[in-house]
Amino acid sequence: MPQSAQPNTQQAALWNDVSGTAWVEMQPILDGVLAPFERLVVDAGYPGEGGSVLDIGCGAGATSLAMARRVGNDGRCVGLDISRPLVALATERARLEKVANASFEVGDAQTYAFEAAHFDTVVSRFGVMFFDDPVAAFTNIRQAARRGGKLAFVAWRSPVENDFMTTAARAAAPFLPPAPVPDPEAPGQFAFADGAKVKRILEASGWSSIKVEQADVLCQIAEGDLMTYATRLGPVGAALREVDQATAEKITTVLPAAFAPFVEDGKARFNAACWLVTAAA
């Protein structure tokens, strides 16, 4: 699959630098937190034994590897991600875990020159909310699916519905300069919070039989991993790389109390509110 130029320069820079590095380092923790979504996406997108699957924004490869195992040795799963560090890790995991029918490539799905009508299914676990032009991206992705092929992905609903995910930022806010009001149209974690917007994007991209369904999933993380998770990722992770030591200490001091309502018996448990989106090419 040859590749063309990438327009998402800000995302490419981010995921090939600090964000990509953080996700590589946090891979075991993140795979544990997101494991329920891996099952959700694989079940929704499973094309049958021997099918071919494209995983958009594959990250460190957990969903791709799970799908490759599910379709069996006669099938295959190709993971695509803009992050070279994450693709390198995913490739190494496939080798170590002896999943020969999973492969990984670096590329931007918005402009990647896919082989036409090649895959039975396209899936994504939180990998499709970051395009500068989502209609162009999903139009291009549709070219990779055979006629009538499946699309299945999960995307986060609103920040209000995902209070665990915004806890660190809210706790750190008093110690940081005022954050700009988020642009709901900008690429980002909550860019698909509006389910009607998601449907409009897919309709404009030529997909049919579109379903945008609420999915509320119980997730958990070991209490011992919680502060690493809270201080390495997201806006707080980014802020802690920039602030002075005194400010960093103030932030890290308040975080345990902020997360205390979620913690019981050595684990933090929380509801993760997302959309399960399916469509046909």
Image: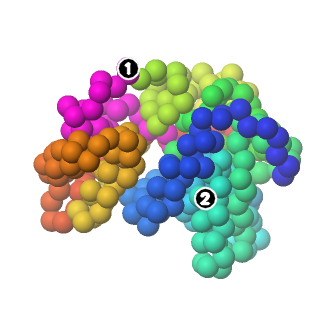
Horizontal side, residue 279 vs residue 231: left or right: right
Question: Where does label 1 land, which residue?
Answer: 181
Badge 2 density bin: few <14, some 14–19, many ≥20, Cα 10 Å: many
x and y percentages locating residue 156 in the rendered image? 44, 38
Q: Secondary structure at mark 2?
A: helix
* Protein image colouring: rainbow
Q: Amino acid at mark 2?
A: Pro
x and y percentages locating residue 52 in the rendered image? 74, 58
* Numbered mark located on residue 85 in the image: 2
Residue 244 falls within the magenta-colored stretch: no
Q: Secondary structure at mark 1?
A: loop
CA distance separating discs 2 and 1? 31 Å
* Numbered mark located on residue 19 in the image: none
Residue 163 falls within the magenta-colored stretch: yes
| Residue 132 showing in the rendered view | yes
Residue 28: quarter of image: bottom left
Q: Amino acid at mark 1?
A: Val
- Which residues lie in the magenta part? 153-181
Counting residues from the N terminus, which is met first, the one under dot 2 or under dot 1? Answer: 2
What residue sits 32% from the left and 51% below the top? 231
What residue sits 20% from the left and 31% below the top? 174
Q: Quadrant of the C terminus?
A: top right
- Near-viewer residue (53 or 21): 21
x and y percentages locating residue 244 in the rendered image? 29, 43
| Residue 153 showing in the rendered view | no
- Near-viewer residue (106 or 164): 106
